[in-house]
Image (cartoon, rainbow, N blue to C red):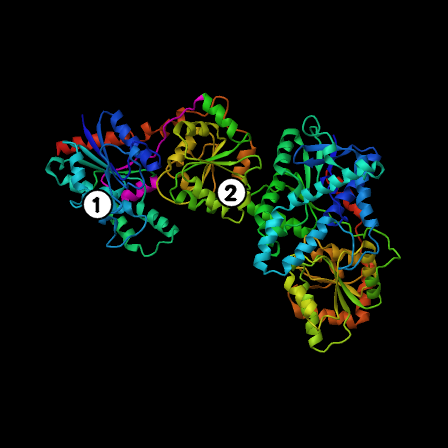
């Protein structure tokens, strides 16, 4: 009986591996090791046009190399506003977000939702154009043919799918965009597949007001279908597991077996000596680091308010506050305040498109990190902070306390006074900070991605 | 041959909704027992096209002054107002009078609305000895209160009080008061009915044509699916979310809730506007109104029947059909009112909460069929047919006529 690992998401991914992509890539890498060790593991992908098809391990290895190469090519590219050559999708998204953030929220929300609903078709069109360009280049210069996987070149299994009775199927990818779960459910019934699926969070349903447009209805449908398809759902935290079960219970969907899998928290690459100029300047100063997409749910606002309150009360020599992440939807007013507020202009810095190497430098050289998010499925930046030996001023919301356990003191995310007090304490009490760091270095056990991947495959047992 | 005058507020030439079906079957049962039947409906023309009318039916026009309740318009109470219209010389009585047969042994009125007309007719010397039957389909006052509340209609206390007075009066004055459920029977008895009678709703056994079964099988889900057949009567969709918790996630991704009847557009709105709209629409297949022979095919192909009726009196004809089918049936306690004796059948599930509905639907749509190759046990379900459920009405009426003649 074969274990099939679905690599649909990484096959179509053209940007640096983050979050879900990283999880799928690491699990795929582990699957390659299992295959090398003689285990009956195979890869498959899904296309709406052709259904499920098998794909060679060699093609997956090339895909992993490509994704890894995107990381490797990145060092030295750093600060927002510089001329980084990023994917067309990412650049289009950033430009569109900037424009939308200037519009009234009601209007920008509608426009965003309009395009969000058509995102798949837009991305498909962009990819199509790029394939056309790639084909043209390959035609004129065959040696330069890239190794980007082209699903259309693969033959669909004669039976419409490659699965056999008693096989197992694992998917950890962007299934709400890339899969047809009704089809998977039919296959499961038809073939007798054992299905393992993932749940990263239930935020679109639980906190739809912090997402773009009416995502609750779409994701409720998705989670219900996941529940019907899966024999087991792997959740990335106990909080996510509880929230998922509560949601499925409310919806009336079946509640399959669940388990909690911890995501790896190693940064993917070794430190490079080449540091971008903006980051290099920062490394000479004291700074608090907040790594996250800049969006309402992440609650950058509480840090901005805490800083303004500290400054208004006459506190001087505060550390810099560095936001690393791409601006998202719904933060136009906040970003405008930050850029125009003379009190914070010298303190708050926003970096975008930071390479892994620069990010490692930032983690290693920051005073501490901050993570005031209103809700998380896990809280990877907290884990990364601890893996780098740094204390984190962390929110008490949702899964975040699961990440740091007893090593951190958690703050109510909307309680500005608490953030003011803790920022002040650790900014000016190096002994207190050193004591926390010593405990972290002594007690924190970072999870390796290999352990995560192993857990995923072991969950079939 | 004895003669019965059968009165209702809807025509029965092409019965669609439950009330019409019951009255049509009462007429049929009288005829099958040797009676001459004259049916007369005082109907709202905006609700019934000419093609559905019988020869004796009398219109209650939309512009009539009788459409006002104490000088003002109150929505959804034309049934109550039709009684005064029918009994009044300025209303429809002159027309009605022309259509009455020369001899009437029994006047059977379904629902209390036309009771003023019954009394008016019996005041006439030639009909003074007629036996009066009051067919109480529901205990109407609380049901009307629920309907008015569900539409946010306030200040109708006197309407509700008048309805209860009318119901009690009909119950007291009738020679026979017919209930459709044991609970209603008990109420009529407490109200002082002379001869309370229980005659539940029934069904007309159906069989589907083979070619229709083939064509519908292609259009319906290949996996087991659940059927809901209902009219646009407000309790049929107003309480749906209350029963199912606004979510159809209990239905597998490859299956559907198949809905037939005029409830479709209302139910679609209800489910689409809920928080889980997209999910619900992915589990919904609406067939709208179907000809009877198509409905027979759909009912034959269903794996399970859903009866999500949280409130309301009376007994649901759809419940009788569902039980008769021998397939899985999942419904509220209220939906099984009048059919309590069937609740121990293995294919029947009573659900009191959304959680219980969800669990039952999941179990039924993923479990094996209960029906053996031989089909359900027909003999034990025969009492569900109209012929059996209503047979006591003409029999009791005949007894009353004899008693009156001897008195």
Residue B208 is one of the magenta-drawn residues: yes
Q: Is residue B365 left or right of residue A369?
A: left
Quarter of the rendering containing residue A187: top right
Check the image and report above or below for B141 versus A283.
above
Q: Which residues are magenta?
A: B182-209
Task: Tell which subunit mark 2 falls on.
Answer: B
Residue A292's x, y, as percent?
72, 57
Residue occupied by mark 2:
B356
Residue B93's x, y, as percent?
17, 41
Q: Is residue B85 left or right of residue B336?
A: left
Residue A297's x, y, as percent?
65, 58
Residue A101's x, y, as percent?
64, 59
Task: Tell which subunit mark 1 falls on.
Answer: B
| Residue B332 visible in the picture | no
Task: Look at the image and tell me in which quarter the C terminus of chain A lies.
Answer: top right
Residue B181 circle label: none
Residue B85 circle label: 1
Check the image and report above or below for B259 versus A240.
above
As drawn, the residue found furthest toward the right would be A273
Q: Determine the secondary structure under disc 2.
A: helix
């Amino acid at each position: 009986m074969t274990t099939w690992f679905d690599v649909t998401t990484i096959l179509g991914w053209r940007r640096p591996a983050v979050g879900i992509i990283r999880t799928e890539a690491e699990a795929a890498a582990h699957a390659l090791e299992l295959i090398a060790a003689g285990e009956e593991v195979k890869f498959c992908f899904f296309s709406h046009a052709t259904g499920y098809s098998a794909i060679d391990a060699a093609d997956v290895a090339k895909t992993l190399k490509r994704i890894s190469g995107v990381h490797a090519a990145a060092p030295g590219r750093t600060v927002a506003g510089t001329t980084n050559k990023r994917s067309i999708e990412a650049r289009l998204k950033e430009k569109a977000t900037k424009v939308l953030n200037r519009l009234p929220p009601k209007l920008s929300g509608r426009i965003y939702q309009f395009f969000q609903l058509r995102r798949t078709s837009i991305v498909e069109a962009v990819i199509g154009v790029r394939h056309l360009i790639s084909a043209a280049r390959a035609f004129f210069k065959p040696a330069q043919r890239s190794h980007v996987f082209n699903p259309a070149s693969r033959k669909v299994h004669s039976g419409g799918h490659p699965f056999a009775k008693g096989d197992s199927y694992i998917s950890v990818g962007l299934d709400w965009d890339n899969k047809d779960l009704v089809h998977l459910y039919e296959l499961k019934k038809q073939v007798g597949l054992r299905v393992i699926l993932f749940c990263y969070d239930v935020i679109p349903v639980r906190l739809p007001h912090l997402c773009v447009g009416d995502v609750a209805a779409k994701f409720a449908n998705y989670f219900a279908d996941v529940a019907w398809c899966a024999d087991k759902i792997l959740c990335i935290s106990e909080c996510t597991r509880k929230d998922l079960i509560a949601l499925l219970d409310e919806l009336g969907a079946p509640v399959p077996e669940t388990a909690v899998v911890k995501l790896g928290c190693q940064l993917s690459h070794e430190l490079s000596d080449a540091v971008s100029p903006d980051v290099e300047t920062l490394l000479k100063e004291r700074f608090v680091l907040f790594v996250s997409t800049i969006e309402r749910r992440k609650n950058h606002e509480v840090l901005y308010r805490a800083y303004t309150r500290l400054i208004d009360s006459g506190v001087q020599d505060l550390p810099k506050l560095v936001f690393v992440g791409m601006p998202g939807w719904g933060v136009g007013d906040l970003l405008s305040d930050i850029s125009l507020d003379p009190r914070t202009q010298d303190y708050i810095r926003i970096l975008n498109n930071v390479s892994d190497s620069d990010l490692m430098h930032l983690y290693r050289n920051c005073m501490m990190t901050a993570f005031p998010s209103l809700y998380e499925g896990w809280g990877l930046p907290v884990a990364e902070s601890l893996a780098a030996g740094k204390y984190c001023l962390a929110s008490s919301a949702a899964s975040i306390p699961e990440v740091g356990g007893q090593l951190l003191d958690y703050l109510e995310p909307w309680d500005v006074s608490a953030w003011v007090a803790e920022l002040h304490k650790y900014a000016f009490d190096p002994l207190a900070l050193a004591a926390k760091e010593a405990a972290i270095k002594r007690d924190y056990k970072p999870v390796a991605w290999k352990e995560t991947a192993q857990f995923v495959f072991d969950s079939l047992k | 041959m004895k003669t019965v005058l059968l009165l209702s507020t809807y025509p029965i030439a092409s019965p669609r909704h439950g009330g019409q079906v019951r009255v049509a079957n009462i007429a049929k049962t009288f005829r099958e027992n040797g009676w001459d039947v004259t049916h007369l409906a005082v109907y709202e023309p905006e609700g019934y096209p000419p093609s559905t009318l019988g020869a004796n039916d009398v219109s209650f026009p939309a512009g009539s002054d009788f459409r006002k309740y104490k000088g003002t318009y109150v929505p959804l109470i034309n049934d109550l107002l039709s009684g005064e219209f029918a009994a009044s010389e300025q209303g429809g009585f002159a027309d009605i009078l022309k259509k009455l047969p020369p001899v009437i042994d029994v006047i059977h009125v379904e629902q209390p609305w036309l009771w003023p007309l019954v009394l008016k007719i019996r005041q006439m010397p030639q009909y003074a000895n007629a036996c009066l039957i009051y067919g109480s389909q529901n205990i109407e006052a609380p049901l009307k209160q629920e309907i008015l509340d569900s539409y946010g209609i306030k200040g109708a206390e006197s309407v509700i009080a008048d309805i209860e007075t009318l119901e009690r009066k009909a119950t007291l004055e009738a020679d026979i008061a017919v209930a459709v459920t044991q609970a209603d029977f008990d109420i009529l008895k407490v109200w002082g009915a002379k001869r309370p009678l229980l005659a539940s709703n029934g069904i007309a056994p159906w069989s589907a044509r083979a070619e229709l079964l083939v064509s519908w099988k292609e259009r319906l889900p290949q996996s087991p699916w659940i059927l809901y057949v209902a009219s646009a009567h407000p309790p049929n969709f107003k309480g749906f979310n209350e029963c199912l918790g606004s979510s159809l996630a209990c239905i597998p991704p490859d299956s559907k809730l198949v809905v037939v009847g005029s409830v479709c557009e209302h139910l679609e709105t209800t489910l689409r506007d809920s928080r889980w709209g997209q999910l619900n629409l992915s589990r919904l297949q609406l067939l709208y109104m179907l000809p009877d022979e198509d409905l027979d095919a759909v009912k034959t192909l269903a794996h399970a029947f859903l009866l999500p009726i949280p409130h309301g009196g009376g007994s649901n004809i759809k419940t009788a059909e569902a039980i008769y089918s021998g397939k899985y049936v999942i419904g509220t306690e209220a939906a099984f009112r009048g059919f309590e004796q069937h609740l121990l059948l293995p294919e029947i599930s009573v659900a009191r909460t959304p959680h219980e509905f969800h669990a039952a639907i999941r179990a039924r749509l993923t479990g094996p069929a209960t029906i053996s190759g031989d089909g359900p046990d027909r003999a034990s379900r025969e009492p569900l047919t109209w012929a059996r459920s209503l047979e006591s009405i003409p029999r009791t009426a005949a007894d009353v006529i004899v008693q009156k003649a001897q008195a």
